[in-house]
Amino acid sequence: MLRIENLSKTYPNGVQALRGVSLEIPNGMFGLLGPNGAGKSTLMRTIATLQEADEGTITFGSIDVLKQKDEVRRLLGYLPQDFGVYPRVTAEAMLDHFAVLKGIVNSRQRHEVVERLLRMTNLHEVRRRNLGTFSGGMKQRFGIAQALLGDPRLIIVDEPTAGLDPEERNRFLNLLGEIGENVVVILSTHIVADVAELCNRMAIISDGCLRLTGDPRTVMDELRGRIWQKTVDKSELEEYRRGFAVISSRWFAGRVMIHVLSDEPLDQGFQPIDADLQDVYFSTLTLQQAA
């Protein structure tokens, strides 16, 4: 169990990235949703011992994450949002180098670990290709391979599917799902579908504050009967936004489909719909902005 209590962080430029965040994260896949600039990456870097917090505590089992950084790093696998590779080094050689840095000094053991991870991430056939020739999805899979070195008990992946094509995204999400059965895996993203497909626990953060946490199915059930849909002309959109709690809008067949949050039944052509996780996400942000 990873426990975060009253975590706060303000940068020197005055931006308050975290405001008293408290979370409990059990084994399994945990989704952290939020818009860009919400504080997700700050929280992930703090858990990963890459930056200090101003206030609060983080514990992982009996380990004080903010004070016992070396102990945390022995148990941690981390895939940041942006990570560089040496373009003229092969995947096999680079992963072997990372394994040495992780403390796997026995050459035979290291070879077995590298082989296993390359096969797990479906990179074995291209292991002798330079990393500079890899596609975005292949680089992400290489990133998760290095994050899995040393059999970590805590894995953090920050915006892992941003920029991937649908096939690579599915392959990467399937890989994460297999990994996240017996360890804590935190998936930080602004892509709602990634969390809906993978995670049995989730939280929404915006403006540095925790806005919602729970089981995705439970939080969707809490919106049952409260989401209404209608297709309108673009010229009518602002009028509907003034008159209703419009939580989202998107183009559909040349018109605009709106979703509205309402505890009371709506007429005027509105249809009730089952809420999905995207409705939960947008309604949470809408209520926060209205507060």
Image: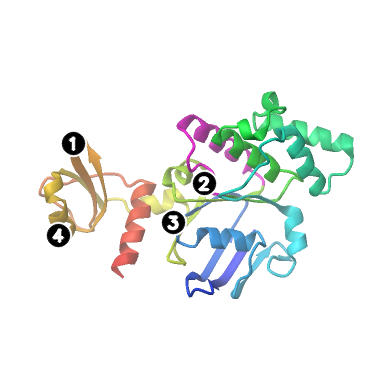
**Viewport quadrant of the N terminus:** bottom right
Segment colored magenta? 158-182
- Relative placement, left or right, of 238 versus 107 is left
**Viewport quadrant of the C terminus:** bottom left
Q: Nearer the viewer, mark 4 or mark 3?
A: 3
Calculate the distance from the C-alpha at mark 1 to the C-alpha at mark 2.
Answer: 34 Å
Q: Nearer the viewer, mark 4 or mark 1?
A: 1
Look at label 3 and name its amino acid.
Asn
Which residue is disc 4 drawn over?
A: 243
Colouring chosen for the image of the structure: rainbow
Which numbered disc flags the more N-terminal residue, 4 or 3? 3
**Image mark for residue 232:** none
Q: Nearer the viewer, mark 1 or mark 2?
A: 1
Calculate the distance from the C-alpha at mark 4 to the C-alpha at mark 3.
Answer: 28 Å
Residue 23, given in percent of the width and then of the height, sits at 55, 64
Which numbered disc flags the more N-terminal residue, 2 or 3? 3
**Image mark for residue 36:** 3
Which residue is disc 2 drawn over?
A: 199
Q: Secondary structure at mark 2?
A: loop
Look at label 2 and name its amino acid.
Cys
Dots 2, 3 in contact, CB < 8 A: no
Look at label 1 and name its amino acid.
Gly
Which residue is disc 1 drawn over?
A: 254
Residue 282, given in percent of the width and then of the height, sits at 34, 54
